[in-house]
Image: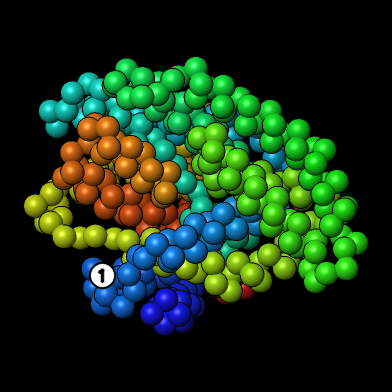
Amino acid sequence: MLIFQLAVILLASKIAGDISVRLGQPSVLGKLLIGIVLGPSVLGVVTNTEVIHEISQIGVILLMFIAGLETDMDEFKRTGKASTSVGVAGIIAPLALGFGAGLAMGQSPIESVFLGLLLSATSVSISVQTLKELGKLKSREGATIMGAAVIDDVLVILALAFLMSFAGGDVNLGMVILKKVAFFAIIILLSWKAVPWVLKKFAPLQVTESTVSAGLIICFLFAYFAEYTGVAAIIGAYIAGVAISLTKFREEIAHKTEAISYSIFVPVFFTSIGVTAQFAGIWENLWLIVFLSVLAIISKLIGGALGAKLSGFNWKNSMAIGSAMVSRGEVALIIAAIGLESGLLTQDMFAVLIVVVLITTIVTPPMMKLFFTGKGTEEDSVALRKNA
């Protein structure tokens, strides 16, 4: 059954991606939507089994690893101030509006803060693919988005730990902060010293694709270490890619990793997001879903855009950056699961927020296409077709 499901996912995602590009949208939008069609909510051809879930996790890790490999470090350094501004403003706006919405819905202050934090989370895995398709990943805007995503992830997780310590959760705030500090200190040291050494040692080995294997080993170990210390695995994978991008092995690893990733793992990741969609009972909470979806989209879009504008971008590029921060993705899903387990979210609210997260993920690619390209150019169309 697994083999059949993989065949269906790969076939459907490629066709849907091509149709999406022909309609002037990023291919990732078609892949997300076809997941909904294939999943239990519509056709029921593909189910979100544990194996499919694990393959999709590998997909998002490899996607962020490739993004790191393609990062222009000189541009990344120049956008540090802008990334901080976008990351912080992109948290303040949804946190404030989410808190106000929670109080208006009759939630307690601590539940309202939790809702605000959940809406503050961002996940740029979808945005990364769209940036690649639009040819913007190596731009100043792309570097700002990637830096802001790292800052956003760390600040939201720290704030969540702080909140849980007051909510009676079994959380040691000092230990959480210590783990984050230890992660970045160790990961920077490893990136500086260990990564080049490992690649040099693996390169001469008399086995097939030793250098690419070394790169993937580094990617997966960094991702595991990030997850172990409470930082999202995708952040660890991204940093691994950045570290390798500074070595002479960058082109070889990037080229061959892309072939592996986009052949199977990344399509499964995109499609599985749609497959996990559950629409049972949403009609009873339709207006709440609409309200929170609009709030989630507007708050992140405006917050990120204001942060970009304050750091010197024009309004068009600021809105483009803000749109890239809208997708909540797996980071928000993890936070929602924590809220359900700790009692800060009811089962009904949990189901509502899952749909909201899915909506923010689906609207992100067309929003980015709109703001990054305006009416679109021939160059943009070529980039879309090339990366489909």
Specify whether 198 is left or right of 14: right
Residue 386 horizontal/vertical position (percent) = 62, 73
Residue type, label 1: Pro
Specify whether 144 is left or right of 119: right
* Residue 363 vs residue 55, the one in the foreground: 55
Specify whether 125 is left or right of 53: right
Q: Residue at x 83, y 53 (%)?
A: 199
Circle 1 packing at 10 Å, graded few (<14), some (14-19), many (20+), is some
* Residue 249 shows up from this direction: yes
Check the picture and name the quadrant holding the C terminus.
bottom right
Quarter of the rendering containing residue 19: bottom left
* Residue 33 vs residue 23, the one in the foreground: 33
Residue 375 horizontal/vertical position (percent) = 48, 62
* Residue 384 shows up from this direction: no
Q: How is the image coloured?
A: rainbow
Q: Is residue 157 above or below residue 334?
A: above
Q: Residue at x 33, y 49 (%)?
A: 357
Q: Residue at x 54, y 45 (%)?
A: 233
Check the picture and name the quadrant holding the N terminus.
bottom left
Quarter of the rendering containing residue 314: top right
Q: Give the residue at mark 1.
A: 40
Residue lying furthest left: 284
Q: Is residue 365 above or below residue 244?
A: below
Residue 188 horizontal/vertical position (percent) = 72, 34
Quarter of the rendering containing residue 377: bottom right
Q: Is residue 32 above or below residue 221?
A: below
